[in-house]
Image (tube, rainbow, N blue to C red):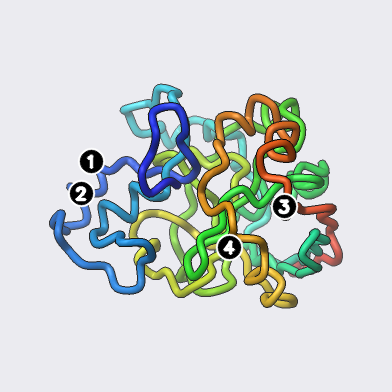
């Protein structure tokens, strides 16, 4: 998540860069059109979407004969639902399509229904690129939901207004979300799978305060929640409440 990570200040969304460089066929100098703030290679884009996570990752693929490690074998894979976000910048509505990313859609609904996003800050805002949020206002909420889910195949492009989960590598999605502020199709091949889109109030998302850029420390948010954010970044925008509005399930 950071363009230049400080040793004690690192921010959200990482990929396994080595694995990516082996599978993408891209060189270190490959240009990526439309990427902000001097990110001039695919590897640098992935580096910018970085999350603090020192958890050891398994090196062997999961055994398909066993239940999935995240316990989400039997989840809805069709249908839609909508969520209203009331924020300090105004309100916006998201429509989630389960067919796009069933695991991501299921986890997002769990988080909304548990009130996870209530009183959480938009801690990373890069105009033209992403708005990122999804660390609990209370550290105990972040700890409660620090449970990884497996990846979904990327079925949609990371278009403007589309939402995807942040990641710290393959199969590491937990709670952090970003809204694309531009058409970031370069993120598709990196495994970021959109699960929904803003259908009302995209102008509100575009107006979320960006003055602090990528300065807030994700690690400090995890440790102290809003106490840190409100002290150091007094004009930060927040989700006041996220509410499930409607749900449509196929017969």
Secondary element type, mark 3: loop
Which of the two labelled residues, at mark 4 and mark 2, occupies the earlier sequence position? 2
Q: Position of residue 248 (x, y in %)?
A: 79, 69
- Mark 2 and mark 3: Cα distance apart in space: 39 Å
- Mark 4 and mark 3: Cα distance apart in space: 20 Å
Q: Which residue is mark 3?
A: 235
Q: Which residue is mark 4?
A: 179
- Circles 1, 2 touching at the beta carbon (< 8 Å): yes
Secondary element type, mark 2: helix
In the image: residue 55, left or right of residue 30: right
Where residue 216 sits, quadrant-wise, is top right
Secondary element type, mark 1: helix
User: Mark 3 Cα within 10 Å, few/some/many (few <14, many 20+)?
Assistant: some
Q: Which residue is mark 1?
A: 18
In the image: residue 212, left or right of residue 82: left
- Mark 1 and mark 2: Cα distance apart in space: 5 Å
């Amino acid at each position: 998540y950071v363009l230049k990570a400080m040793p004690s200040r690192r921010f959200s969304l990482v990929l396994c860069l080595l694995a990516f460089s082996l599978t993408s066929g891209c060189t270190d100098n490959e240009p990526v059109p439309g990427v902000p703030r001097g990110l001039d290679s695919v590897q640098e884009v992935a580096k910018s979407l970085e999350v603090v996570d020192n958890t050891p990752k398994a090196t062997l693929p999961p055994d398909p004969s066993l239940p999935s490690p995240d316990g989400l074998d039997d989840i809805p894979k069709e249908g839609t639902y909508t969520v209203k976000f009331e924020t300090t910048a105004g309100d916006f509505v998201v429509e989630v399509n389960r067919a796009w990313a069933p695991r991501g859609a299921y986890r997002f609904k769990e988080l909304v229904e548990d009130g996870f996003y209530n009183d959480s800050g938009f801690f990373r805002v890069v105009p033209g690129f992403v708005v990122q949020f999804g660390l609990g206002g209370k550290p105990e909420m972040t700890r409660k939901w620090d449970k990884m889910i497996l990846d979904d195949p990327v079925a949609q492009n990371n278009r403007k207004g589309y939402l995807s989960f942040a990641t710290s590598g393959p199969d590491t999605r937990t709670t952090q979300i970003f809204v694309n502020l531009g058409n970031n199709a370069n993120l598709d091949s990196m495994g970021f799978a959109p699960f929904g889109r803003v259908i009302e109030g995209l102008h509100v998302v575009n107006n979320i305060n960006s003055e602090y850029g990528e300065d807030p420390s994700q690690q400090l948010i995890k440790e102290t929640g809003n106490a840190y954010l409100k002290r150091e970044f007094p004009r930060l925008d927040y989700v006041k409440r996220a509410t499930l509005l409607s749900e449509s399930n196929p017969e």
